[in-house]
Amino acid sequence: MNSRTVTHLIKIHIGNSELSIDVPEELKSASNFPVRGLALIGHPHPLLGGSKDNKVAQTLAKSLSLLGYVCVRPNFRGVGLSEGVFDDGHGELDDMEQILHWMQTPSSWVDLPELADFSWVNQVGQLPVVLAGFSFGSYVNSQLTKRLNAAGKVPQRLILVGSAAGKWDMPQIPSNSIVIHGELDETIPLQAVFDWLRTQEIVVHVIPDADHFFHRKLHLIRDTIIGLWDAN
């Protein structure tokens, strides 16, 4: 995605998990740049061509990197070099929890010489965590948010793009979540998102004339996230 993107394989319970790690560009010139937190990003449906290199997933990483976060984009099981087979979100949820644990463990980064010497690495266990997801990835990371909340490990923020309302069992989400949807989404109708969130009183940020994959509208996802980040 940029000159600070690193690809890496880690071991989790199913075997190898393939990650792309995106860090703020400022780290190129300032190794002590104050990283704001860690972000874990979920991509769209693995059986429909979804991968960590999906343009929306990359846009989420770029947006959060611009805000000062170190971002991890895993390939879900069965995609790329990630081992395992698709499990309809159940196994993927467990995988993402293990990947997050890896992210929050300082010794995990020793195998990444490009990043291991940065000062923020020793603080990963204390850094805030942001979860973000597009489509199927929105389901997995909203469920991970629910699991972390129940364990008292509350993430700083949840960002959902093209939320999988009506496709999977989307849970209640935190009040400070950022929800972005395309006006003309043909895969997950905007009305399904309204129906899911109506009782939660959470704002849906609608991108006019955008389809499910936000063709020619990716910059509006970035601008929405950055514009809202420090506003509430």
Image (cartoon, rainbow, N blue to C red):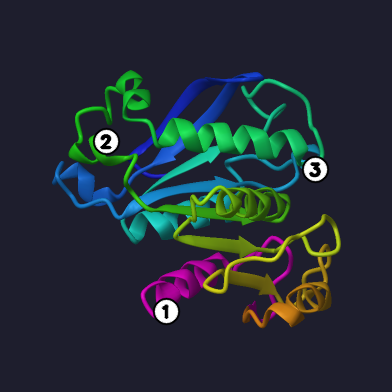
Magenta stretch: residue 111 in it? no
In percent of the image, x 55 and y 31: which residue is there? 98
Q: Does the rendering let one see residue 113?
A: yes
How packed is label 1: few (under 14 Cα within 10 Å), some, or many (20 or more)?
A: few
In percent of the image, x 27 and y 22: which residue is there? 113
Q: Earlier in the sequence, mark 3 or mark 2?
A: 3
x and y percent of residue 132 in the render?
A: 55, 55
Report the Cα–Cα distance between label 3 and label 2: 35 Å
Disc on res. 121? 2
- Magenta residues? 205-232
Q: Earlier in the sequence, mark 1 or mark 2?
A: 2
> Which amino acid does the dot numbered 3 rest on?
Leu
Question: Pointers 3 and 1 in contact (CB under 8 A)?
Answer: no
How packed is label 3: few (under 14 Cα within 10 Å), some, or many (20 or more)?
A: few
Residue on which disc 1 sits: 232
> Which amino acid does the dot numbered 1 rest on?
Asn
x and y percent of residue 83 in the render?
A: 67, 20
Residue on which disc 3 sits: 48
Q: Nearer the viewer's eye, disc 3 or disc 1?
A: 1
Q: Secondary structure at mark 3?
A: helix
| 180 over 52 or under it: above or below | below
> Which amino acid does the dot numbered 2 rest on?
Val
Q: Does the rendering let one see residue 55?
A: no
In percent of the image, x 45 and y 73: which residue is there? 223
